[in-house]
Image (tube, rainbow, N blue to C red):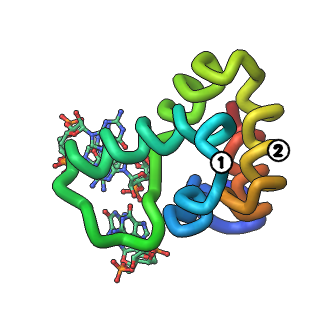
Amino acid sequence: PSPLGPQPKLVIDLERLAQLPKEKAGALARYAATIQSQRGDYNGKVLSIRQEDLRSLAVIYDKSPTELTEELITWGVLDAEARRAVESF
Ligand code: C2E
Ligand code: C2E
Ligand code: C2E
């Protein structure tokens, strides 16, 4: 276990995501909507996603998981805690 506590989660800010231009955030928005639909989880302001899903999203965005995480933090879709979630990749 990490001395900083439990494994940090990847938590998508769905309200922020909805404010971003489609050219940037469209693929992530569709991915998040698919997960919400699979879970039947429609009313959340945030969505916790699998580490594995960030790997898939990195392929979609043609970036490394670390690069994509930094971009999503810049957009305000992930918080800075997400960096620690990706360190373990
Ligand atoms: P599944 O992967 O066969 O998971 C079946 C059920 O196990 C999930 O039902 C959930 O109750 C539980 N489960 C599996 N992994 C986790 C986990 O890491 N954390 C928690 N809290 N529960 C877990 P649920 O939520 O109704 O999801 C149904 C199906 O939807 C899943 O079947 C999976 O195929 C898909 N799904 C849901 N959320 C995600 C996601 O974040 N990423 C991916 N790749 N698929 C997801
Ligand atoms: P947490 O993980 O820190 O989540 C805090 C709150 O963020 C949750 O309160 C919920 O309002 C929101 N949230 C986080 N991820 C999601 C998501 O994927 N979908 C939606 N709709 N909301 C999300 P909530 O539901 O009262 O849960 C309180 C705490 O209970 C969570 O704190 C967590 O510690 C635990 N918990 C709830 N669901 C799960 C779960 O599926 N797996 C695990 N391991 N813990 C859970
Ligand atoms: P969580 O529920 O607190 O789960 C933390 C980690 O425990 C998961 O990280 C995964 O490595 C493991 N885990 C929990 N439940 C299961 C399970 O049923 N099967 C397996 N194989 N592993 C499990 P991960 O995958 O990175 O997921 C992070 C968070 O994303 C989860 O935190 C949960 O909030 C959400 N999540 C992921 N998959 C699902 C899903 O299928 N359904 C729902 N409702 N939430 C999910």
**In percent of the image, x 42 and y 38: which residue is there?**
30
- Asked whether mark 1 lies closer than 8 Å to ligand 2, one says no
**In percent of the image, x 21 and y 50: which residue is there?**
39
Q: What element carries label 2?
A: helix
What distance separates the C-alpha of mark 2 from that of mark 1?
18 Å
- Is residue 11 among the parts visible in the rendering? no
Number of numbered discs: 2
Q: Is residue 14 left or right of residue 88?
A: left
- Asked whether mark 2 lies closer than 8 Å to ligand 3, one says no
Picture coordinates of residue 85, whole percent (x, y): 67, 48
Q: Earlier in the sequence, mark 2 or mark 1?
A: 1
The residue identified by callout 1 is 21
Picture coordinates of residue 43, whole percent (x, y): 29, 71
Q: Is residue 79 left or right of residue 18?
A: right
Q: Is mark 1 on a helix, strand or loop?
A: loop
Q: Is residue 37 left or right of residue 25?
A: left
- Is residue 73 among the parts visible in the rendering? yes
Picture coordinates of residue 15, whole percent (x, y): 53, 68
**In percent of the image, x 73 and y 48: which residue is there?**
72
- How dense is the environment of label 2, judged by Cα within 10 Å: few (below 14), some, or many (20 and up)? some
* Ligand 1 found in image quarter: top left
Write down the quadrant of residue 8 in the picture: bottom right
Q: Give, as a three-letter code, the residue at label 1.
A: Pro
The residue identified by callout 2 is 70
Q: In this view, does 69 lie to the left or right of 6?
A: right
Q: Give, as a three-letter code, the residue at label 2.
A: Glu
**Closer mark to the observer between disc 2 and disc 1:** 1
Q: Quadrant of the N terminus?
A: bottom right
**In percent of the image, x 70 and y 38: which residue is there?**
88
